[in-house]
Amino acid sequence: MSMLMGLGIMLITFVAMEGVAWAMHKYVLHGFLWFLHKSHHTHHKHAFEWNDLFFAYYGTLAMLFFIFGSEPIDYRFWIGAGITLYGVAYFLIHDVFIHRRIRLFGKTSNVYLKALNMAHKVHHKHTGRDGSESYGMLWVAPRYFRAAYSILQKRQQGEQTWRNTPLKS
């Protein structure tokens, strides 16, 4: 298998993982495994929550693909790489950027990241099992883009107005 084909499989797996994550989140986490995911929808002071066990599930899945696809390297290795890449993106975007479990990022002026954050906040508006929306991580509905663009545009106009206002002495 060529490196280019392997990278293609990895990229396709990464993109497909968004659909897998959406379906798992909507039908499994907000379904029969709500008792674990519920910890993610409640405020707490501890570093870990029961919901973090899902990292172990996807990590184990990726590890199995790596193990069984390594000698020689075949498509399973690249599927494991795609799952791992999605896991890294999930950690950085969901846990670090959105939930600030590690404080690295401040406010953003990026429309996509603002829309992503808004969609996730709407998802968490409901603390119960039912009534949530926006189950994906990377895909954002167009209405959130419009809202984010509008907010950022108003923020930018406010900053320009403030900078152009003469100081009175």
Image (tube, rainbow, N blue to C red):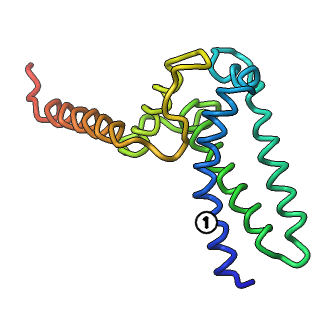
Left or right of residue 167, residue 12 in this image = right
* Quarter location, residue 81: bottom right
Most distant residue in the bottom direction? 2
The image position of residue 100, as x and y in percent, is 58, 31
Q: Residue at x 64, y 15 (%)?
A: 42
In screen coordinates, is 121 left or right of 167? right
Q: How many marks?
A: 1
* Residue 71 lies in quadrant: bottom right
Q: Position of residue 148 (x, y in %)?
A: 33, 37
Amino acid type, mark 1: Leu
Q: Quadrant of the C terminus?
A: top left
| Residue 49 in picture, x, y percent from top left | 75, 24
Residue wearing tag 1: 11
Q: Residue at x 58, y 58 (%)?
A: 15
Rendered-image quadrant of the N terminus: bottom right
Which residue sits at x=61%, y=66%? 11
Going 52% across and 24% down the picture, which residue do you hit? 132
